[in-house]
Image: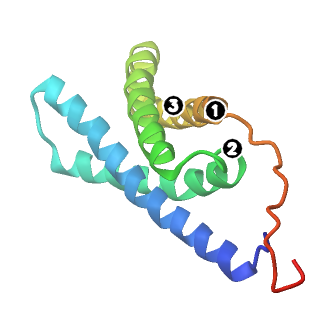
Amino acid sequence: MKRSPARILAVTAGLVAGGALFGAVAGAVAVTILMTLLTTFDRLLLLSAAQTGAVLGAVLLPIAGWTLLRRVPLWRTLTGTIVGTVIGSLVGLVILGFIAYPIGVFIGPLLGAIAGFLWAAVRLRRSVPVAHEVERIRVPRGADA
């Protein structure tokens, strides 16, 4: 299959846009779960988490998409990495939030989200079997086929 630079650029732009959108969703979901558990609501915290998630998603999804997740279906890539990011963010908050209290509350969810995304990407990569190169299908052409 011929890979044109325009197609590669279009796919990369789509991955950046999708990564930003779904990264924002992942950040907002993680903070919404946290605020539900704490029975409080902070609009600025929710907006900040969505913005941070959008930046991380715009960077991480194209990198993972072109390296680890080439053979993984797009819907599994998006749902799997969102779930991994949300779980990683909450685990990072719990672990680093208690160990290094003042700074851990800010750094923990960020590092946890990155680790959760990478864990989900590797797990998705291993779940899809490697497709061996198949023979080309011979298509008859005209009368001399």
* Residue at position x 81%, y 81% in the image: 141
* Residue at position x 52%, y 68% in the image: 14
Between 98 and 85, the one lying in front of the other is 85
- Return the residue at label 2: 68
Q: Nearer the viewer, mark 2 or mark 3?
A: 2
N-term mark: 2 or 3: 2
x then y, percent, for residue 130: 74, 37
- Return the residue at label 3: 116
Amino acid type, mark 1? Val
Q: Which residue sits furthest right?
A: 144
Asked where in the image residue 38 lies, by quadrant, the reply is: top left
| Label annotation for residue 122 | 1
Q: Is residue 129 above or below residue 52?
A: above
- Quadrant where the N terminus sits is bottom right
Amino acid type, mark 3? Gly
* Residue at position x 65%, y 47% in the image: 71
